[in-house]
Image: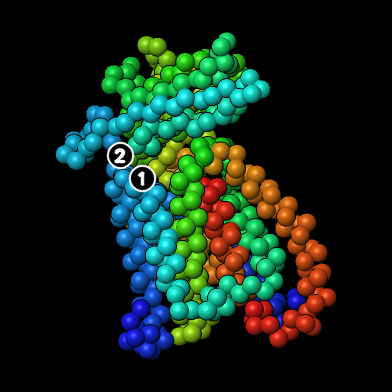
Amino acid sequence: MNRAFVLAPAPVRAVGLAAMAVALSWARVVALRTPEWQAVTLLAGGLALCLLGVGRSPAELGLARSRMPERLVGGLALAGVLLLPAAVRWSGGPVLAPEFAVAAVAVSVGEEIAFRGVVFAALEDAYGPAPAVLGSAAAWTVAHALSHPPAFLPAVAAAGLLLGAWRWAVRDLVGPIVGHVLADLAL
Amino acid sequence: MIAHPASRRRIAVLALAVVAYALAAWAVAPGFYDGIAPPQPYRWLSPPPQFRSANQLPLSGHATVRVAANGVVDPASVFTQDGQAAVSFVPGAFVTPADRSPVTIDIKPQTTSPNPGKVQLVTNVYCVTSSSTMAPGKDILVTLQFSTQIQAPSDVYEYQGDGPWQKLGSTGSAAPYYVAARATALGCFAAGSVASSGSSSAPQGAQGGGGNTLPIIVALAILVVVLAGIPLAVLRRRGSSEDAGDEETG
């Protein structure tokens, strides 16, 4: 990140980071339209999103190590909530291939660090907690606009709000990461 | 932890978010779906005119499934190379060969098929064959992708031999642009809708993902939350005075 961007006013940084996170997500989706190297593309896309967190302390991103058992339990609870609508209508299906399972973890972690970590923190610095929850969820929904049919976007937005609300209420990103990873692996 | 007004507000917001998510997710199955790999442009065997110029031919799939030490054919998911068709099955879905040799399964797009009558097929026809017959009382899950550019089909259909087409139905939705159904016999499969019924009520297509992992994960998550959450809350309450200054509680 260049010096001018780091020194930019907080609102400019927040909007810029949100735009970067969305752009990286869209780039990944567009790159995936080439059938070759899909798992590698996903891994690279997840890593690129993680890189947005460079320069922020773990605590700023909600990744402090205190009360880890509670954070992990919270993540399981979030996974339960995220998966429940699918679980009650479940009828079985193919498993995710191993290379895509690894890629799914990378993308999930990357999305959480980028949207609920970096973008959330930047928006909170600039505008406060409510815009941080709403703005990070909005950016995350826009990031999914290329890969999802419009009918699915309200559920994506609602999931973003839930994960963002957790991030704000518990000051924690471990829970959203665990919940998101499990949800992606299961579906 | 709960007694503080700020904590109550946070819990209330979280509860509201959970309710909002449940409502939004219930409106479209499977709910939150992160779609790791978005669907590629559908590969048509006989493309409709609007897709003819950029069309690529669909690919077939092949897999060899071994017989486990207990003499039962392993579970597996077999995909075509382009991911447009898949079959998945539980252990023992196929009869174990006498020599316990591996069972081979093939999925091939089919050029010709019986007239489906009033059913409008909107996917390629895929024929599934295996080197061993299906075990009595067992079934397979057939999952078919459909084009993002067409109306979602309502059901999966199957024919065997020379036909006719039989409706298998749909298991319900699990992913955009996929439809799935259970079949008790191998044959040829395609997705479609009855043309006269209109297509406005056709559900989103479905693909299961994760085999039996989803219900297991959900059950484990709930179990762990129940078993671990209560003692953790008690410990947290006991240690709340020590934690008062911790920035992580906000």
Find numbered disc 1 in the image and state the secondary structure of the residue it sits on.
Answer: loop
Q: Secondary structure at mark 2?
A: loop
Q: Is residue B200 toward the left or the right of residue B239 in the image?
A: left
Q: Which residue corresponds to the image point at 33% horizontal and 25% vertical from the top-left?
A: B109
Residues at marks 1 and 2 on the same chain: yes
Q: Chain of mark 1?
A: B
Name the spot of residue A176 as percent of width and height, x first: 57, 64
A59 to A85, vertically: above or below: below
Q: Is residue B80 visible?
A: yes
In the rendered structure, the answer to whether residue A124 lies left or right of residue B236 reads left
Frontmost residue, B127 versus B81: B81
Q: Amino acid at mark 2?
A: Tyr
Q: Which mark is residue B59?
A: none
Circle 2 packing at 10 Å, graded few (<14), some (14-19), many (20+), is many
Tags 1 and 2 touching, CB below 8 Å: yes
Q: CA separation, marks 1 and 2?
A: 8 Å
Q: Return the residue found at the far left.
A: B53
Q: The C terminus of chain B lies in which quarter of the figure? A: bottom right
Q: Residue B223: x, y in percent?
A: 73, 52
Above or below — where is B85 with respect to B16?
Answer: above
Of A33 and B177, which appears nearest the observer?
A33
| Location of mark 1 (residue) | B39
Is residue A125 found left or right of A142 in the rendered image? right
**Residue located at (50% from left, 72% from top):** A117
Q: Is residue B148 above or below residue B187?
A: below
Check the image and report above or below for B33 versus A98.
below
Q: Which residue is mark 2?
A: B42
Splitting the image into 4 quarters, where does residue B97 fall? top right
